Amino acid sequence: MLNLHHLASFVTLRETGSFTEAAARLGIGQSTVTQHIQRLEKALGRRLVLRDTHQVRLTAEGEALLGYARGMLDLDGKVSSLFGESRLRGRIRLGVSEDVVANRLTAILEAFIRLYPLVDLELTVALSEDLNRMQEAGELDLVLAKRHIGETHGRLVYREQLVWLARDPDLVLSRHGALPLIAFPPPSITRRVAQQALDREKLPWRIVCTCSSLSGLTAAARAGMGVLVQPRSMAPEGLREIPAGEISAGGLPVLADIEFVLVARRGADAALVKALSDLVAGQLAPQNVG
């Protein structure tokens, strides 16, 4: 019989690609995750994980196990929810900032479905300011969105620096004329931060592409249309960070940090909000380590 704790470490390691991040997400020590993987490999008599100085990846046997491991954890979560003490049920309306969707939302939803199969989740993806307005109108119970440094509303999940991104940073830095910006439409926080940073340094800019979808903005940036601003850990593949700070040498200004927060609607189901908030915070906060 395979140990479910060992399987949880195995699946989380696959999702994070790091023993350190897997341990942080699970709330256990890194050595414990290592022991779980070793014992799982010993129980199956197969090598499941390959490690080198750059990455952690699964062997062919590990990939074959992954689907079964997720299925076993999913079944365990459903049984625990049905017969455990909690037995949360009902409906919760979650609003998520567009930035998070590209590379974080899937893991959150997978964990939620596994842990709370009796809870219906309604998901809305939009810009942070739009989500805040929807919540004020009573349309959302919990919002995961960005806020400016210095603002105090919401439960802080993590803080991260915004960076300039482009397909060819060298070409951008050798530019002449206004900096071509690719941005969400107003009232986007990242758009505002970028424009304010450029205005402070009296650097000219122009919006060359506006889209409310991050996938659309990413496509434009990958096509070489201009510069995109995103949190560093959420940089889309195919784009490179543009070094910032050397304004006199033609560089771009350093951008401010941004904070991601969870904001609950007053009057929302407290148990559901706490369960989902704790899950989101646990999934996201370790990503900011280092």
Image: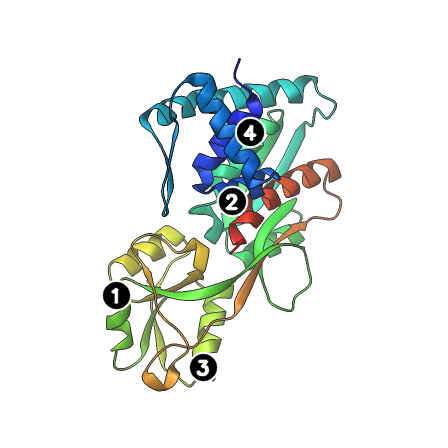
Q: Mark 2 or 4, which is nearer the eye?
A: 2
Q: Distance between the residues labelled 2 and 1?
A: 30 Å
Q: Where is residue 224 in the image (x, y as percent from the top left)?
A: 25, 63
Where is residue 280? Give x, y as percent: 59, 43
Whether tag 1 and tag 3 are in contact, CB under 8 A, the answer is no
Question: Image point 55% across, 19% down: which residue?
Answer: 75
Q: Is 282 rendered above or below residue 148? A: above
In the picture of the structure, the residue carrying the numbered disc 3 is 199
Q: In this view, does 95 lie above or below 232?
A: above
Residue found at x 36% / y 27%: 63
Provide the secondary structure element on which disc 4 rests.
helix
**Mark 1 vs mark 3: in front:** 1
Give me the C-alpha separation between circle 2 and circle 4.
Answer: 21 Å
Q: Name the residue under label 4.
A: 113
Instruction: Establish if 226 lies above or below 140.
Output: below
Q: Earlier in the sequence, mark 3 or mark 2?
A: 2
- Judge depth for marks 2 and 1 and give the one in front: 2
Mark 1–mark 3 Cα distance, whole angstroms, equals 23 Å
Q: Which residue appears at 69% of the width and 36% of the height?
A: 272
Q: Distance between the residues labelled 3 and 2?
A: 38 Å
Q: Looking at the image, do the residues carrying marks 4 and 1 touch, with CB atoms under 8 Å apart?
A: no
The residue that disc 2 covers is: 21
Nearer to me, 131 or 243: 243
Residue sitting at x 57%, y 54%:
145
Tell me which amino acid carries mark 4.
Ile
Q: Position of residue 61 (x, y in %)?
A: 35, 23
Residue type for callout 1? Asp
| Quadrant assignment, res 181 | bottom left
| 278 sits left or right of 211 in the view | right
Any part of residue 204 in sight: yes
Q: Earlier in the sequence, mark 4 or mark 3?
A: 4
